[in-house]
């Protein structure tokens, strides 16, 4: 073999050798577990969970801890005008758009120690791995900690340009308005336009998150490749009957709104379970009037919620439920009317290319994976409006979330961070170009 051929073969082997080396780089489960435990001290409650609601003292203290970790990992850290923490690592080609990844650390009241936190700790872990291996990416990398995810996706909505003045006056769980809260975090609610990112400004957004459901845990699958975040539609459904004396009105002469409501609720369940796909339909609230034990209900108002990855599918589910409702109304002489409640939650599919990259990254690391929807809302749904977006799920033990019993093992967290690490490198190497 000639010297020229040897050099050519050697050059061809460099990318292969580098790719193989990447497969041997894994996140440190002990380091991630230690940091999760340290973060859980901020807002810790007696039940073993956290009350680290957005804008609270615990949230501010937890954010300070995270910023210390980010600076320790070599990130140039700042707070944007929406209160989002941004940690930047420059690339070898700083004019390229940044690859953005992260999540949130605020909790619901009485929340757990993994929701959001795993994505933030995992993002910092990726930076630590890059530093340890002296890997310099072409693209700048930005780790983000979004503000007030649990209170309404405030930080990510601001980054997508979706926050209005009406939002700023909403009272948060911490007892102050969202505008006041942003100010408390070091943001500037009067200049939210500076936090906005336009389409094309970000190369890609990735979010590592616990599943918050039981599918991965029950099926013993390592990684969930999120196909998208479901859209949500809500209705108030009113069933009209005729209120009358419960003791003197024979059963065959009743226009009982509650009986129709019972049949309607069963019909909602039957429609949602009989159609193929991952759609869900729920009646979560019901109120009868006049509401006395000795009066036949003359009116029942109940809620209807439908979720799916497809707006067309949600409409189809509603149409079938509505048709079933009409049959019930006609049979029992109890008219049914609908009032749709405005909910700004459209389906947010993830980028198909990123799904493939995440699945391949998991496979190359020897991890099992499953394509699946996200039934819960995430910052990623707003980021999908401005950048190719991907989500990585790791198992939640027994599917428990928003609870002190929420738990994800250190190894599962590390698996997710390892997939995130490899996915970031694949994007940087031109997988989306």
Image (tube, helix red, strand yellow):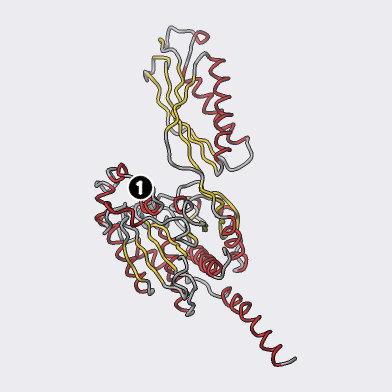
| 358 to 323, vertically: above or below | below
Instruction: Indicate the quadrant where residue 3 lies.
Output: bottom right
Give the residue furthest to the bottom: 3
Q: Position of residue 241 (x, y in %)?
A: 45, 15
Numbered disc 1: secondary structure: loop
Q: Is residue 322 left or right of residue 32?
A: right
Q: Position of residue 56 (x, y in %)?
A: 27, 53
Q: How many marks?
A: 1
Q: Which residue is mark 1?
A: 163
| 114 to 237, vertically: above or below | below
Task: State the quadrant of the N terminus.
Answer: bottom right
Q: Is residue 285 left or right of residue 316?
A: left
Task: Out of 85 and 432, give the one closest to the viewer.
Answer: 432
For the point 53% across and 18% down, which residue is it?
A: 329
Task: Out of 22 and 302, give the one closest to the viewer.
Answer: 22
Task: Out of 162 and 154, give the one closest to the viewer.
Answer: 162
| 329 to 377, vertically: above or below | above
Q: Residues within 10 Å of mark 1 (few under 14, many from 20)?
A: many
For the point 53% across and 15% down, which residue is it?
A: 332
Q: Position of residue 188 (x, y in %)?
A: 27, 55
Q: Position of residue 406 (x, y in %)?
A: 43, 54
Q: Is residue 139 left or right of residue 63?
A: right
- Residue 46 visible within the image: no
Task: State the quadrant of the C terminus.
Answer: bottom right
């Amino acid at each position: 073999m000639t010297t020229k051929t040897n050099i050519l073969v050697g050059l061809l082997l460099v990318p292969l050798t580098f790719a193989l080396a990447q497969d041997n780089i894994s996140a440190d489960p002990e380091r991630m577990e230690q940091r999760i435990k340290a973060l859980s001290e901020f807002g810790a409650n007696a039940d073993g969970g956290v009350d680290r609601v957005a804008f609270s003292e615990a949230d501010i203290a937890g954010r300070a801890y995270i910023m210390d970790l980010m600076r320790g990992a070599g990130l140039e850290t700042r707070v944007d005008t929406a209160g989002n923490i941004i940690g930047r690592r420059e690339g070898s080609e700083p004019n390229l758009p940044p690859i953005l990844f992260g999540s949130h650390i605020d909790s619901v009241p009485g929340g757990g120690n993994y929701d959001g936190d795993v994505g933030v700790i995992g993002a910092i872990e990726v930076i630590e791995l890059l530093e340890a291996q002296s890997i310099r990416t072409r693209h700048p990398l930005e780790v983000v900690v979004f503000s007030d995810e649990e209170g309404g996706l405030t930080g990510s909505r601001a980054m997508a340009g979706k926050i209005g003045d009406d939002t700023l006056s909403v009272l948060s769980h911490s007892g102050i308005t969202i505008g006041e809260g942003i100010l408390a975090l070091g943001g500037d609610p009067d200049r939210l336009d500076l936090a906005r990112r336009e389409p094309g400004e970000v190369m890609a957004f990735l979010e590592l998150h616990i599943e918050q459901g039981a599918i991965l845990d029950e099926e013993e699958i390592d990684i969930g490749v999120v196909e998208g975040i479901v859209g949500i539609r809500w209705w108030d459904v009113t069933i009209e009957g005729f209120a009358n004396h419960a003791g003197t009105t024979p059963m065959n002469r009743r226009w009982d709104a509650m009986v129709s409501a019972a049949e309607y609720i069963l019909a909602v369940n039957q429609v949602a379970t009989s159609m193929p796909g991952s759609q869900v339909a729920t009646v979560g609230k019901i109120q009868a009037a006049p509401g006395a034990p000795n009066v036949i209900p003359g009116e029942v108002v109940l809620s209807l919620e439908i979720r799916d990855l497809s707006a067309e599918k949600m409409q189809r589910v509603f149409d079938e439920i509505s048709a079933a409702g009409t049959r019930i109304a006609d049979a029992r002489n109890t008219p049914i009317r609908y009032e749709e409640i405005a909910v700004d939650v459209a389906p947010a599919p993830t980028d198909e290319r990123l799904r493939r990259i995440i699945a391949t990254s998991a496979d190359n690391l020897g991890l099992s994976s499953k394509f699946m929807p996200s039934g819960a809302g995430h910052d990623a749904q707003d980021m999908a409006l401005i950048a190719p977006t991907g989500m990585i799920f790791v198992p939640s033990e027994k599917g428990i979330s928003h609870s002190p019993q929420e738990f994800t093992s250190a190894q599962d967290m590390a698996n997710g961070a390892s997939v995130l690490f490899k996915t970031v490198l694949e994007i940087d190497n031109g997988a989306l170009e």
